[in-house]
């Protein structure tokens, strides 16, 4: 019997635009490798414009760990190398040649592997970056043996892709990947219910997490199963990563294509599309040129994703969701003074969203609904959406103060910004809590390593 | 916004003010830049306006009661609308002064800090007249408000950063600087020029009689009605908004229902007061029944509206129980042992505010060491 955790605290944001369970064809466009997707990676470019690559050919390596590679998502020609401020490497764009050439990797039987063979397979193929290390959410250090590997097989984020739908057919690959990763460290795998397709996976400790968002966040699950303390290192892998690792081991091919949920209140035709990381967000959303005006296309969910205007405008390596939102630039006359604001959602009881029916969904946009203020509401206002043994406001204030000692005490090791995303959502003082936590983590990385 | 009001423009010094009025009328069209792309519709303006609305019943009752007490004290027959009108005209200047002085300082400081004007003073400014004697001289009120807003709030960095409740500090300022206006019998009943109290009317609040025991309270009942139900209803002299427990309970209901104020603080404050009251009865220190303390003076208003201020109260849930209990016990202790100044609630809450960070520190440190211990045992 799996352990069952009932998560009481949290919030499911009732936003419109869920993607129906059908896959739509998408015109193939250029894919890309975006080193910015991987925290802690110091990229060294291995290709130049005009080079031909296969799916799985090395494109970038890490300066600190040369064996750590990022590889091309598809075969084609390197058509563009995008650099940002101070020549920061943003994206290596690969124009597909339509030949579907794939780099050859040996087929391996997961159960006969050992730790070093698993590591070798992941490093040489460029699938290693799917391993994310906690604390801090960096790309996993190949020289480290983690305490455990945690996998959340579902997401509770707003409008999240349904992994039972997207990855249900890949069950054998996922099983293979779990078996292989089990050679490195004990694997903990969380599912949303006992009858999930993934609940029968062997070789892992299965946990059932029930409850509202962020019950599906792997960080929340870790804090319930085995909290990260000072000195602990755990790894996490996304379900898409497992499928890719399984395909590599069983079939010797590098394939990181995934079904992406195109969703959101402003999505014209919510649906799933097959896409590669680094594909253009506007293209995935089925919008081009002027159609995207006044819209924000987010890679990931609407709480923690990155918008298409930021950085590269491409689908993130870890994302399986594209959320389309309307920019909320319209002023709202007497907004906060109205007794009822039926079209706006609020988790706060000073509005009446809570009594308007559970099924009600809202066309939310990107309006901030206020101005930035100092923290006024007490810690408990925020902790009601954070199911972790943490005082969120204390942690955030420690991050603001840059106080390493306090950050450590208040649980910086246990969180990534996404875990406090709901605190940011409900914050009436409109603080950028995720950004504050991210800066805190950066400071920890700088000071502690 | 007109470019004249932007940085470098001619009227830049008015930027925060214009912005405040604009965002008062309209929720601005600002979009999210970092982090969560979509945000909850709630903002501090909404929370503050609901907190203010919760105090409206107490304010309205207070206005009527000022007129009612005037009628009783001058021997005229009480009549609802004239009494209310009398009280309204008496209380209105307090509001004008409170908001004019407070908002001026608030707007100026926001401009100096280059921030948006915080709506916190909407509530503070509404509470201040409610905890003042109705006859407080306006110049005194102005100085007290200026002192409280400037030295207790703005120098700490504005709303959210203050240690003490600014409204209570305004009251404390008058209490310590001009004690004659805050104590005694002359200040609680508003009189027109040339009017005098009729024979037998003292103008004393029930609380000031507390040292003389229950019999004295009931003795004045002929005039003002100082039995339990009169105190509960609020038809007694006192600060403008503090007398009616019914109106305050209505506010408490709104605050708890919307989750703005902590019911834990309210409950533990009441528990603390009852405990000390009962102990005092048992020890023979006072013959005033413990539950009388809950309806007398500023206890109810302080517990519901002042102690629960989210900025200056304890932050942690365990801390709130301790903090509320501390305030309740301190208030009654002061009432019992300092009959010269019977209104203990103001000082109890200010002391509670002072200790709130310490309480939270203890609670969070215990939490941290519990986590560490669990980690070591693994």
Image: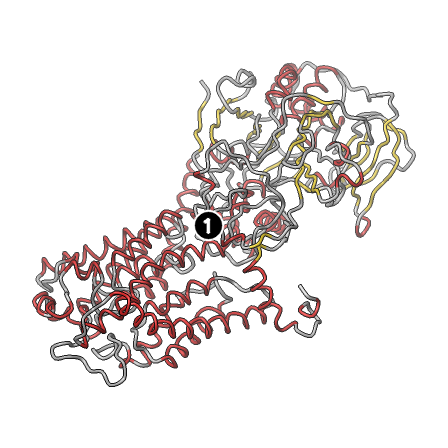
Residue B278 visible to an observer of this rendering: yes
Q: Is residue B331 left or right of residue A228?
A: left
Q: Is residue A405 above or below residue B2?
A: above
Indicate the quadrant containing the N terminus of chain A: top left, top right, bottom left or bottom right.
Answer: top left
Q: Residues within 10 Å of mark 1 (few under 14, many from 20)?
A: few
Q: Is residue A143 left or right of residue A88?
A: left
Q: Nearer the viewer, residue A244 or A384?
A: A384
Task: List the residue tagged with mark 1.
Answer: A339
Q: Residue furthest right?
A: A50
Task: Give percent across and percent down for residue A158.
Answer: 57, 34
Task: Give percent across and percent down for residue B79.
Answer: 23, 67
Q: Which element is circle 1 on?
A: loop
Residue occupying the point 30% across, 72% down: B86
Q: Is residue B204 left or right of residue B168?
A: left
Q: By what rule are the colours in the image chosen?
A: secondary structure
Residue A141 visible to an observer of this rendering: no
Q: Is residue A304 above or below residue B78?
A: above
Total numbered labels placed on residues in the image: 1
Q: Is residue B267 above or below residue B71?
A: above
Task: Give percent across and percent down for residue A393.
Answer: 49, 51
Q: Chain of mark 1?
A: A
Task: Give percent across and percent down for residue A349.
Answer: 43, 45
Q: Is residue B248 above or below residue A182?
A: below
Q: Nearer the viewer, residue B343 or A190?
A: B343
Q: Nearer the viewer, residue A154 or A411?
A: A154
């Amino acid at each position: 019997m799996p352990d069952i955790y009932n998560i009481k605290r949290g919030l499911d944001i009732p936003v419109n635009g869920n993607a129906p369970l059908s896959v739509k064809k998408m015109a193939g466009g250029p894919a890309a490798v975006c080193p910015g997707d991987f925290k802690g990676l110091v990229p060294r470019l291995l290709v130049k414009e005009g080079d031909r690559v296969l799916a799985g050919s090395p494109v970038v390596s890490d300066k600190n760990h040369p064996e750590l590679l990022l590889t091309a998502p598809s075969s084609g020609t390197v058509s563009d190398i995008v650099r940002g401020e101070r020549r920061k490497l943003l994206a290596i764009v690969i124009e597909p040649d339509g030949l579907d050439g794939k780099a050859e990797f040996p087929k391996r039987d997961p159960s006969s592997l050992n730790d070093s063979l698993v590591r070798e397979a992941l490093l040489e193929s460029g699938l290693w970056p799917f391993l994310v290390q906690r604390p801090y959410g960096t790309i996993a250090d190949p020289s480290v043996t983690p305490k455990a590997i945690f996998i959340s097989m579902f997401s509770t984020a707003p409008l999240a892709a349904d992994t039972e739908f997207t990855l249900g057919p890949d069950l054998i690959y996922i099983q293979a990947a779990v078996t292989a990763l089990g050679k490195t460290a004990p694997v903990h795998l969380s599912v949303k219910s006992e009858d999930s397709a993934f609940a029968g996976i062997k070789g892992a400790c299965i946990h059932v997490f029930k409850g509202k968002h962020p019950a599906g966040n792997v960080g929340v699950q870790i804090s319930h199963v085995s909290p990260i303390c000072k000195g602990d290192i755990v790894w996490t892998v996304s379900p898409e990563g497992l499928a890719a690792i399984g395909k590599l081991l069983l079939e010797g091919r590098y394939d990181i294509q995934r079904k992406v949920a195109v969703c959101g209140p402003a999505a014209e035709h919510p649906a799933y599309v097959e896409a590669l990381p680094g594909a253009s967000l506007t293209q995935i959303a089925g919008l081009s040129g002027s159609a995207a005006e006044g819209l924000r296309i987010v890679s990931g969910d609407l709480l923690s994703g990155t918008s298409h205007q930021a950085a590269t405008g491409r689908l993130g390596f870890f994302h399986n969701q594209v959320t389309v939102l309307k920019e909320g630039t319209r002023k709202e006359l007497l907004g906060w003074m109205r007794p009822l604001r039926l079209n706006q959602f609020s988790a706060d009881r000073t509005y009446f969203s809570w009594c308007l029916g559970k099924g009600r969904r809202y066309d939310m946009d990107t309006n901030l609904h206020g101005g930035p203020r100092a923290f006024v509401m007490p810690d408990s206002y925020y902790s009601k959406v954070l199911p972790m043994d943490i005082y969120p406001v204390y942690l955030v204030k420690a991050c603001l103060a840059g106080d390493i000692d306090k950050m450590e005490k208040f649980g910086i090791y246990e969180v990534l910004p996404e875990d406090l995303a709901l605190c940011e959502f409900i914050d009436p003082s409109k603080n950028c809590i995720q950004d504050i936590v991210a800066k805190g983590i950066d400071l920890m990385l700088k000071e502690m390593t | 916004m007109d470019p004249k009001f932007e940085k470098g423009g001619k009227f830049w010094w008015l930027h925060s003010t214009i912005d405040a009025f604009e965002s008062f009328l309209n929720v601005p069209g600002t979009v999210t830049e970092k982090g969560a792309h979509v945000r909850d519709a709630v903002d501090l303006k909404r929370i503050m306006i609901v907190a203010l609305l919760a105090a409206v019943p107490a304010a309205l009752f207070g206005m009527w009661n000022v007129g009612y007490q005037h009628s009783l004290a001058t021997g005229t027959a009480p009549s609802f609308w004239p009494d209310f009108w009398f009280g309204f005209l008496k209380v209105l200047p307090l509001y004008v002064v409170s908001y004019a002085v407070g908002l001026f300082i608030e707007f100026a400081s926001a401009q100096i800090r280059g921030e948006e004007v915080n709506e916190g003073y909407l509530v503070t400014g509404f509470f201040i007249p409610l905890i003042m004697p109705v006859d407080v001289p306006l110049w005194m009120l102005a100085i007290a408000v200026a002192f409280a807003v400037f030295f207790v709030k703005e120098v700490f960095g504005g709303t959210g950063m203050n240690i003490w409740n600014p409204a209570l500090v305004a009251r404390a300022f008058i209490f310590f600087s001009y004690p004659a206006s805050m104590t005694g019998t002359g200040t609680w009943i508003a009189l027109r020029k040339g009017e005098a109290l009729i024979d037998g009317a003292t103008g004393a609040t029930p609380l000031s009689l507390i040292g003389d025991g229950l019999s004295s309270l009931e003795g004045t009942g002929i005039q003002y009605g100082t039995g339990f139900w009169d105190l509960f209803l609020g038809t007694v002299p006192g600060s403008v908004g503090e007398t009616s427990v019914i109106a305050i309970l209505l506010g408490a209901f709104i605050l708890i229902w919307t989750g703005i104020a902590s019911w834990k603080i309210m409950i533990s404050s009441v528990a603390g007061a009852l405990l000390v009251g009962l102990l005092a009865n048992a020890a023979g220190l006072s013959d005033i029944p413990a539950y009388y303390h809950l309806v007398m003076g500023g206890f109810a208003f302080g517990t519901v509206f002042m102690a629960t201020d989210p900025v200056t109260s304890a932050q942690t849930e365990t801390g709130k129980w301790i903090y509320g209990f501390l305030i309740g016990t301190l208030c009654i202790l002061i009432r019992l042992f300092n009959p010269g100044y019977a209104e203990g609630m103001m000082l109890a809450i200010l002391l509670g505010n002072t200790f709130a960070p310490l309480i939270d520190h203890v609670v969070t440190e215990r939490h941290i060491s519990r986590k560490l211990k669990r980690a070591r045992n693994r």
